[in-house]
Image: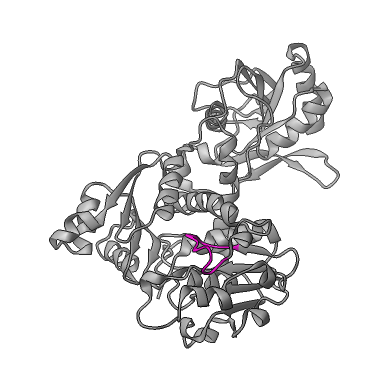
C-alpha cells in the first residue's frame, strides 16, 4: 500500500504524522525551511508561492499559538486564510465532519489545516478527498487527539539541528506526560527516523504508554538517571484537560519530583538546550529560572515554527 | 559549436561595465552561476558595496508546475535596496523569466533607484520584454530549446561554460 501522505511521484501530498514519513522527506522539509527564516529582513514579508490559494484553518479544538503560526505562515506565502471557529458553527447543529469538508471544498478550498480532539480525524479527511478524486486538495494535521502533531515535531527537529548541527551523536530526553502527548509521539518518530542514537523518556509510570520501549526509546524512572549527560531536554506540558482519574497526586508533588529545575538540569551536559512546545505551566513541569534561563530555546522554537510551516505548506502547494 | 571561454567573457563584461559604475553601484548575483560571476566582477571592478545574492525559486512563475527543486538557497541583500543603484548579474540570459523573478524579489526589499542587468551570454529565445544592458556575448543563432548553457566552477575557482543536452 502506498504511504497515504505521499503522491504517486513520492512527493508530500498530506502531512498527517511523522511516523512512517521517509527520512529524506523530513530532511527536505527542514532544508526548505531555512530560506524562510530570513523573511524578517525584508520590507515586504510575503512570498508569492501560495498566491490565489485558499487555506482553511479548521480547528475543532482550542489553540492560539498553533493556529496563529499556521495563519502567519500561510499569509507570508500570500494565501487567503479562512479561520473557522468550528465549536460555534455547523457541527454544533449536527453536521458531520465530512459534510463540513465537502461544503468547504465547494468554496474552492486548496488546503485544510486541521486540529481535532479525535485521533485520526485529519487522516479521515485525507482519505475522503482521495476517494472522491480531489487530489489537488491537501491536509495538514495541526494536532489530533493523542496521535500526532507533526509540524510541532518538525519545528523541534529544526531547532535541534539549528543548535546542535547533527543528529547522529545526540542523547535526547523527553520529560513529562508522554501518555497524553501527541507532541511526544511526533518527536519520538522524528528523532528515531533522523538517527538520534539515544532517546530517553522520563516520567512517572502512570504517564507512560505501556509499550513505550517498542517506539525505540529508553524509559528512565527518575530525572537523575534520565537527564545524565543529555544534549537536549524536551519538556512536555502536563495535560490537565486530558487527565482522567488519579494519575497524579498534585501539581506541587509533580513539580517536586519531575519538574525541571536548575539543580536537575545541571546533570545534563553544560551546553544542553531546553525545549518546551508551550503553553508552559511554570512551577509544574518547569521552573521559571530554567524557562527564562540561557539554556532555554523555547522562543526560537516558536519563530522556527513559522518557517517550518511555510516549508510544509509551500511543498504541498507546489503540485 | 565551440564553447566560448568564460574567463575571456568575464574580462570583456567587466570592461563593458567599468565606464558605467559608480562607487555606490551594488551587484546582486542570481544563484548559482550569477553569484560566482558577481563575485568575480565585484573584485575586478573594485566595488565597495557588499555583494548581494538572490535565489529566485520562490518567485518563479513555473513554481506551480515544477515545485521547489532543488532546495532553495538563502537570499541575502546586505545593503539598503531603497534608492540603490543595482546591477543584477546572471550567467546566461534566455527567456527572461529568471530576471523577472529576480526583479520581483528585489522589490520586496525596497525601491531601488536604478536596476541594470549584466550577463555573460545572451542565448536568445526571449519570452518577456527584457534585455541586458551589459552582455559579453550574444549568440548569432539562438540556442535550441532542448539545450542548456551554464557556468560551472571547479575546485580552483576557475569558471567554464558548459553545454547540457536535456
Measured as percent of width and height from the top left, residue B16 is found at: 75, 16
| Magenta span contains residue A284 | yes
Q: Quadrant of residue B24?
A: top right
Q: Quadrant for residue A226, please give it.
A: bottom right
Task: Farthest residue to the bottom: give it.
Answer: A210
In percent of width and height, residue A300 lies at 59, 52
* Percent coordinates x, y for residue B8 in the rendering: 81, 28
Question: Going by the image, does B67 lie left or right of B10?
Answer: left
Closer-to-camera residue (A244/A65): A244
- Count of numbered circles in the view: 0
**Residue pictured at 67% horizontal, 82% vertical:** A225
Up-down relation of residue A49 to residue A234 (above or below)? above
The residue shown at (59%, 58%) is A158
**Front in this rendered view, residue A262 or B81:** A262
Q: Residue at x 50, y 35 (%)?
A: A45
Kindly give the residue lying farthest to the right in the view shown.
B156
Q: Is residue A58 magenta?
A: no
Numbered range of the magenta stretch: A275-286
Q: Is residue A17 above or below residue A218?
A: above
Q: Is residue B53 left or right of residue B40?
A: left
Amino acid at each position: 500500500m502506498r504511504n497515504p501522505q505521499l503522491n504517486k511521484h513520492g512527493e508530500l501530498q498530506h502531512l498527517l504524522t511523522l511516523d512512517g514519513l521517509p527520512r529524506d522527506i523530513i530532511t527536505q522539509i527542514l532544508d526548505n525551511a531555512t530560506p524562510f527564516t530570513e523573511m524578517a529582513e525584508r520590507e515586504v514579508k510575503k512570498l508569492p508561492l501560495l498566491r490565489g490559494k485558499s487555506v482553511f484553518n479548521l480547528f475543532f479544538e482550542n489553540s492560539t499559538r498553533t493556529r496563529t503560526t499556521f495563519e502567519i505562515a500561510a499569509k507570508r506565502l500570500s494565501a487567503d486564510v479562512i479561520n473557522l471557529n468550528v465549536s460555534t458553527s455547523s457541527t454544533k447543529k449536527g453536521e458531520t465532519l465530512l459534510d463540513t469538508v465537502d461544503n468547504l471544498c465547494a468554496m474552492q478550498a486548496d488546503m485544510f489545516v486541521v486540529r481535532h480532539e479525535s485521533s485520526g480525524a485529519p487522516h479521515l479527511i485525507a482519505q475522503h478527498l482521495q476517494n472522491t478524486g480531489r487530489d489537488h486538495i491537501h491536509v495538514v494535521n495541526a494536532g489530533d487527539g493523542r496521535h500526532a502533531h507533526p509540524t510541532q515535531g518538525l519545528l523541534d527537529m529544526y531547532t535541534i539541528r539549528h543548535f546542535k548541527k547533527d543528529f547522529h551523536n545526540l542523547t535526547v530526553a523527553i520529560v513529562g506526560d508522554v501518555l497524553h502527548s501527541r507532541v511526544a509521539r511526533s518527536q519520538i518518530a522524528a528523532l528515531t527516523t533522523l538517527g538520534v542514537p539515544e532517546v530517553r523518556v522520563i516520567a512517572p509510570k502512570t504517564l507512560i504508554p505501556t509499550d513505550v520501549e517498542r517506539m525505540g526509546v529508553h524509559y528512565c524512572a527518575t530525572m537523575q538517571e534520565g537527564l545524565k549527560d543529555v544534549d537536549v531536554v524536551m519538556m512536555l506540558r502536563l495535560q490537565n484537560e486530558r487527565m482522567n482519574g488519579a494519575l497524579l497526586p498534585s501539581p506541587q508533588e509533580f513539580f517536586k519530583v519531575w519538574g525541571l529545575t536548575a539543580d536537575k538540569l545541571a546533570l545534563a551536559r553544560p551546553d544542553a538546550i531546553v525545549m518546551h512546545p508551550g503553553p508552559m505551566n511554570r512551577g509544574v513541569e518547569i521552573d521559571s529560572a530554567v524557562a527564562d534561563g540561557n539554556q532555554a530555546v523555547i522562543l526560537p522554537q516558536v519563530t522556527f515554527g513559522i518557517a517550518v510551516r511555510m516549508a510544509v505548506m509551500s511543498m504541498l502547494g507546489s503540485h | 559549436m565551440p564553447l566560448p571561454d568564460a574567463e575571456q567573457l568575464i574580462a570583456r563584461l567587466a570592461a563593458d561595465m567599468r565606464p558605467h559604475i559608480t562607487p555606490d553601484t551594488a551587484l546582486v548575483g542570481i544563484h548559482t552561476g550569477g553569484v560566482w560571476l558577481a563575485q568575480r566582477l565585484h573584485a575586478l571592478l573594485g566595488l565597495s558595496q557588499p555583494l548581494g545574492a538572490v535565489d529566485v525559486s520562490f518567485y518563479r512563475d513555473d513554481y506551480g508546475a515544477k515545485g521547489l527543486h532543488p532546495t532553495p538557497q538563502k537570499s541575502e541583500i546586505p545593503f539598503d535596496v531603497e534608492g540603490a543603484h543595482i546591477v543584477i548579474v546572471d550567467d546566461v540570459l534566455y527567456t527572461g523569466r529568471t530576471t523577472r523573478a529576480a526583479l520581483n524579489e528585489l522589490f520586496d526589499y525596497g525601491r531601488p533607484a536604478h536596476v541594470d542587468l549584466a550577463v555573460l551570454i545572451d542565448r536568445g529565445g526571449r519570452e518577456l520584454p527584457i534585455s541586458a544592458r551589459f552582455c559579453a556575448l550574444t549568440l548569432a543563432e539562438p540556442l535550441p530549446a532542448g539545450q542548456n548553457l551554464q557556468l560551472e566552477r571547479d575546485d580552483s575557482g576557475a569558471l567554464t561554460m558548459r553545454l547540457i543536452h536535456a
